[in-house]
Amino acid sequence: MHYVSTRGAAPTLDFAGVLLAGLARDGGLYVPATWPNLSAEALRALRGRPYADVAVAVMTPFMGETVSAASFRRMVIEAYAGFRHQAVAPLVQLDSDLWLMELFHGPTLAFKDVALQLVGRLFDHVLGERGERVTIVGATSGDTGSAAIEACRDRAAVDIFMLHPKGRVSDVQRRQMTTIHADNVYNLAIEGTFDDCQDLVKAMFGDVAFRDQLRLSAVNSINWARIVAQLVYYVYAAVQLGAPDRAVGFAVPSGNFGNVYAGYVASRMGVPIDRLIVASNRNDILARFFETGDMSMAPVVPTLSPSMDIQISSNFERLLFELLDRDGAAVEEALRGFRASGRLALGPNRWQAAREIFCGHRLDDAGTLDEIRRVHGATGELVDPHTAIGIAAAMAKRNSGALPTVALATAHPAKFPDAVERATGCRPALPAHLADLDRRPERYATLAPDLAAVQAFVRAHARIANP
Ligand SMILES: *Cc1c(COP(=O)(O)O)cnc(C)c1O
């Protein structure tokens, strides 16, 4: 299996190459040159299989010679052994034709663990075989930093430095990061805003000498390996609900478009997916595009579902590549126009092609609170604001012909307890493994938003700079 860039002007790479590269050298994103096929027979054989078996079967065709079958199987088993539910991604029935897929049983209570727990291990394995080491730097507004740290902790070939704006992330979010005591994990509380943190990370990558000395890297949401790891649960749910003999729909709370794009990949591989419902909050550029064909930028507004407060969804480029018949030059041109004018010009035929599988739905904060309350009353389930938006989208856009629809639960309700309590009067408790979170010792360094100071810290602690 080899991979091509969505902008058509970067060298093709194998799986190990795209795993370590992240972004392609021409600024594009890597996608497989061809889609592997999951035949009806192969899907039937996955019915009733444990999650790890499905993961190995679905991911192996993407990996080529990168990892031996035995090592890969061991990594998959280790990655999901830490999940608090034996089914890893259990389905909970909400209505006769509606299911919730709980993707929040990993260590940090959000769906990102499903991919990152495996990708961290793949990263370490490939680097270890090459005798290489990297330094990962990232910025977080609170939500996603802990999943990256949990994925990298105690990995021999990786050091991770995570910047967060001091005093501007919630206590639970900060503690989920700062109570992880591993020798290769550094939390930096920056005396500034999230934008300051992001600018510092960009500046570190922009300093070529520093970047090369530290071998800077990222495990961000455009990494192809994350997409393949997410593909697994679409197949897992579909075969449980009747694939290949019955089609299934999915409703996906969306931000960077990585999660729902993995569902698109599943459909390209032959999983019968009737529709992909893209659920947005008020930052609805994606939902608006799929409903009306208009993709125009608007300022980001903060909402109760902060992981979806995004205007430019980086993974959308991968779908655009398909809509433009895999013409990299056309992708480059469309994106240049989008940056210049704030509006993506895509003819009605291309939009119609997207509409064959995608639709969109948007819900504002008041609607989100109403939906959390309604779901609790109707089913007894407490759901977080992101998940509630997915369920509302499923209710609005599901197939009325009795095909099953699966709404993806992307965060545990205890990750957003204030909104859940406001809607229902019930405050969701943290799962047992985090119950004493507010009594665990924290470890972090506080630094000014000053590039030289942050670089000096990273240089002083990264193992690659201190052999
Ligand atoms: C990251 C995240 C999302 C958005 O997923 P994308 O892959 O960026 O579309 C939705 N919900 C939660 C809770 C998240 O953490």
Image (cartoon, rainbow, N blue to C red):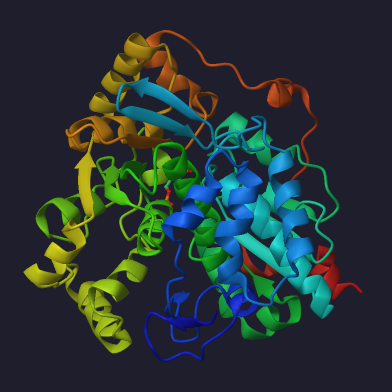
Q: How many marks?
A: 0
Residue 319 x/y as whole percent: 31, 67
Residue 299 vertical placement versus 387 (above, below): below
Q: Is residue 191 left or right of residue 455?
A: left
Is the C terminus in the top left, top right, bottom left or bottom right quadrant? bottom right
Farthest right residue in view:
467
Residue 155 vertical placement versus 329 (above, below): above
Task: Give the residue at x 39% y 32%.
Answer: 387
Residue closest to the eye, 58 or 313: 58
Residue 219 vertical placement versus 94 (above, below): below
Q: Is residue 186 left or right of residue 183?
A: left
Task: Give the residue at x 52% y 42%.
Answer: 47
Q: Is residue 163 left or right of residue 281?
A: right
Residue 179 x/y as whole percent: 75, 37
Task: Give the residue at x 29% y 42%.
Answer: 279
Task: Give the residue at x 17% y 73%.
Answer: 341
Q: State whether residue 270 appears in this view.
A: yes
Q: Is residue 102 left or right of residue 115?
A: left
Residue 353 vertical placement versus 210 (above, below): above
Farthest left residue in view:
348
Q: State whether residue 448 appears in this view.
A: no
Farthest front residue in view:
41
Where, by quadrant of the figure, is residue 158 drawn?
A: bottom right
Residue 192 x/y as whole percent: 54, 50
Is the N terminus in the top left, top right, bottom left or bottom right quadrant? bottom right
